[in-house]
Amino acid sequence: MEQIEDAGIKKMVIYKDLGIMDYSDAWDFQKKLLSQVQEIKLFNQQLPYCEQTSNYNFLLFVEHPHVYTLGKSGKEHNLLVNEAFLREKGAQFYKIDRGGDITYHGPGQIVGYPIFDLEAFNLGVKQYVHLIEQAIIQTLEKYNILGNRLKGATGVWLDTDIPGKTRKICAIGVKVSRYVTMHGFAFNVNTDLDYYHYINPCGFVDKGVTSMEKELKSKVDIEEVKNVLHDQLAKVFGFEFSDIPA
């Protein structure tokens, strides 16, 4: 198991399950927490260590109603349908400020938004993404699903060594501002995969998508998966959860 080394200082994370929430509301909540972490961080930089205020990191889990999001470097032609069709399918569309191309969020998917100060974790962006992938891989192991990384692509994939069968089970797209992260990952548990037919997921035209439900051929207890993933993230990043509410 990969994890960051313990530098002797406990890293505390406030966890919040937002339930089912509209994408724009969750985005606004992320931005609020990001600003809070950044403001305390900047304030502390002007003070001696003994006078600094405790700063917290946040981990949000949420399920969104059907929505497509396009990253700042994404190509709009990877959305294969028009706005009228999206309305008919009950789906929204947002251009957002994360990296990556287009992806889908919907019911039955665990969307994770870590608001982490990477300087406090002594991490670079690549290491940070690598550890998210590792936590997803270790979560899948608990269900006897073998997840892997794919060279040249972020996220967690299955059957990366079998041409034509490689498929993604978790997408990752992040933004880092003053070393503080937002956005995050989308992990398909009981996701309706039909919604991926209307996009080139993450810009790929030659690779598929999958879910835990599809791989296991039965629905999975998503609350149980959240608990497993929550624990795996704590292990690989080396943090503890705070009981302070978000």
Image: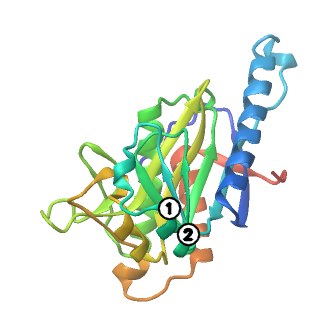
Q: Is residue 86 above or below residue 9?
A: below
Which residue is nearer to you in this view: 193 or 36?
Answer: 193
- Disc 2 designates what residue? 87
Q: Is residue 186 left or right of residue 55?
A: left
In this orientation, does residue 154 appear? yes
The colouring scheme, among rainbow, by chain, secondary structure or one colour, is rainbow
Q: Residues within 10 Å of mark 2 (few under 14, many from 20)?
A: few
Return the residue found at the far right: 51
Tell me, yes or no, if residue 12 can be seen here: no
Q: Secondary structure at mark 1?
A: helix
Q: Decide: marks 1, 2 in contact (CB < 8 A)?
A: yes
Q: Quadrant of residue 223?
A: bottom right
Residue 83, disc? 1
Nearer the observer, 147 or 20? 20
In this image, 155 relative to 114: left or right? left
Outermost left residue? 163
Residue at the image point whose x is 37% and y is 44% from the top: 75
Q: Where is residue 212 shown, x and y percent of the image?
A: 42, 76
- Is residue 8 rendered to the left or right of residue 151? right
Q: Residue at x 24, y 58 (%)?
A: 205
In the rendered structure, which amino acid carries the disc numbered 1? Answer: Glu
Residue type marked 2: Arg
